[in-house]
Amino acid sequence: MAPRRGRAALKMAVRGGRCRGTGSWPRRKSREAAGPAGASPGRGRCERGPARRRRRRLRRDRAAAAMLRCGEEVVSEESEEESNGVNLMEFSDEILLHILSYVPCTDLVLNVRRTCRKLATLCLDKSLTHTVLLQKDYKVNKDKVKQLMRDIGKEIYQLNMAGCYWLPSSTIDHVTRCKNLVKLNLSGCHITSLRLSKMLSSLQHLRSLAIDVNPGFDASQLSSECKATLSRVSELKQTLYTPSYGVVPCCTSLEKLLLYFEILDRSREGFMLSGQLMVGESNVPHYQNLRIFYARLAPGYVNQEVVRLYLAVLSDRTPENLHAFLISAPGSFAETGATKNLLDSMARNVRLDALQLPKAWINGSGLLQHLKFNNPFYFSFSRCTLSGGHLIQRVINGGKDLKSLTSLNLSGCVHCLAPESLFRKAEDDIDSSILESLVVSCCNLRHLNLSAAHHHSSESIGNHLCQLLSRLKHLLSLALPVCSITDVGASVEKPPTTPNLVPQTFGRKVRIGVQTYPRNLGDQTNQKIESSVFWALMGSLRFLETLEIIGSSFSSAMPRNEPAIRNSLPPCVRAQSVGDSEVAAISQLTYLQSLTLAQLPNILTGSGLVNIGLQCQHLRTLSLANLGMMGKVVYMSALMDMLKHCKCLRDLRLEQPYFCAGAQFFQALSHCSSLQRLCIVSRSGTLQSDAVMSFMASCLEVIMCHMFMGESLTVCKNLQQSIVRRLLSCKVLAGGHLGFFFSRQNALH
């Protein structure tokens, strides 16, 4: 049965089982309505009322349950509807199609379509069935996919099943019904070479493909029909979990190639893997039509060996139409003779629009001076020793042709805002004229990353980094170091810390208290807060969607692409003045969707988090790490108050030593009804198993719960087994959907 809210909202979707403007359902005579033989007409009419009401109630429940899936809130009082005469079916088809576009395709075809004749027609409109997105639709199972392909398979032109790891591999067989498929994404789905061959043989119109290449993949098992389909593919995204060319040699018309290298250095049995590939006529990639080349490497020497083999063909025959060349490699990726020849060939023959190279390929070379750019839209010089002078002269080129640049990544470029890097310390003030030239030349920037560096502004008026960045009105994402947002006067006039005034004695330790601060921002001195440069910056970037404020020396306890560091470096001196008031300034970003705060040592109560929860109602991703004093979670109370208002929050990551995940925390977290992923990393942290169980029972949308705490392995295993048994008993895991939970003793122990 539908919830009470759904039954009350009934007549907005279907009024008494009828759709205005489309006629009514054919009435069927029931035994109750007709009455027994010989019954009087009066008795039959009396019994027709309850039967009609039951049928109406059934139709109302079905319609309400289907429409509630789109998350729309409607007026639910029947008396109001009778007086106002509001009926959803009276809207035009264009408005209804726009409303239905927010409903998952599986619900449209399998549920909403069956409510009435008008919705049955609209749900099969080409605008709704042209593109089917099953990505992150965790309620989809094999049977639903089978029914979906059977009903609208011929109408699907784009199908995205990325990350549907819970679906069995046999589900892929039903994709063959989509004869007109042009774009297919199967990343994260396990598929064998034989099953891939069978599927692609029937997709003659396919032009874009995304697959995973797992151990055991054999390109020789691909049929001639499959290779014919691959020869017409122009876009390929391939994730490699084993050394292989995959299907790249079969794609002779490639224009866009995206490669993700996730190969481990050792096999599951512990044997060392080799990055050598079979080389021959049939295994040589074809890059003559290539326009975009992108490669992202996970840590490991095998990934570097394999990507060099992919690049060897490029060095021999560099495509003339190549305009985007991007390689993202963590750590050290040394330059070889083949890669040097490739870069020299690119400097002579192509004009690029997007560039990203490993830092070892740029540092100490004059490559940027020789490369030619057409209308660049993306530059990434992460971790490069690029000075501000080189940035202005070689990249920005005096502001010429840089209005097209929309994304710039200078993360870890400690000297990018200084004229020279020979005699400069990382903590010295930046040259504001370089940043001003960058802002003027790249006035259409939408994404800017200046993190992982010390960008200290000088005391000159009007030249603060925040003041200059406020001119970039089109910014959608911004990443800054903590020390760059502080007011120069506040950091200079900061009094000496209290512990220095305490005498060193052998007696009883003196407990140094913390000054009490008001929880509400309104109780503070608003004039001082709103006059800060960071407050003004947040006020000027009203449409910012992603914000990262990270300490210059911050290092995560569990990084993905870097080795874990037990003891991170202390925060920057200027970062000591960044605290609750700066966090409160973020609440001005009404459209904020993703927020990351890391290594803010002056957080005393976390009162700014409450303001963010109240004002930023679109927040979906929140990541907090090392806020305030490291020995105590000083912002716990404010965090719990914040979570009560985050109705749209889907991803939450907390990294804080001594974090106590108790009943109060999980009770506050239960208010986040849209939460899907939770990750807590805490050295010497604790958790309450009963509280975790109650949280998992109340938040049914959670599909990932990772907790790296200080509990014993026995406690973690028992908790994991209890959650799995609870979900199985409630049939939450039915249909192949796995609510995954993983917890173990802290990795730093």
Image (spheres, helix red, strand yellow):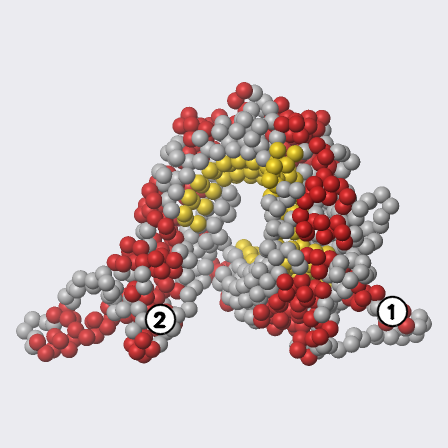
Amino acid type indicated by mark 1 = Pro
| 465 to 489, vertically: above or below | above
Tell me which residue sits at (69%, 71%) in the image: 530
Residue 560 visible: no
Residue in view at x 63 percent, y 71 percent: 610
Up/down of 478 relative to 492, above or below: above
* Picture layout, residue 704 above or below residue 149: below
- Estimate how packed mark 1 is, as few (under 14), some (14 to 19) or many (20 or more) residues with alpha carbons within 10 Å: few
Residue 348 in view, yes or no: yes
Q: Nearer the viewer, residue 60 or 337?
A: 337
Residue at figure coordinates x 39%, y 53% from the top left? 105
Q: Position of residue 649 (x, y in %)?
A: 55, 63
Residue named by callout 2: 9
Q: Which residue is mark 1?
A: 496
Q: From the image, which quarter does the N terminus lie in?
A: bottom left
Q: Earlier in the sequence, mark 1 or mark 2?
A: 2
| Callout 2 secondary element | loop
Residue 192 image point, x, y percent: 47, 36
| Observer-nearest of 689 and 133 | 133
Residue at 70% in and 57% down:
468
Comparing marks 1 and 2, which lies closer to the viewer? Answer: 1
Q: Quadrant of the C terminus?
A: bottom right
Classed neighbour count for the residue bearing mark 2: other residues with Cα under 10 Å, few (<14), some (14–19), many (≥20): many
Instruction: Specify the label residue 543 is tagged with.
Output: none
Q: Which quarter of the picture shows residue 314?
A: top right
> Based on the displayed image, in which of its 4 quarters is residue 358 positioned?
top right
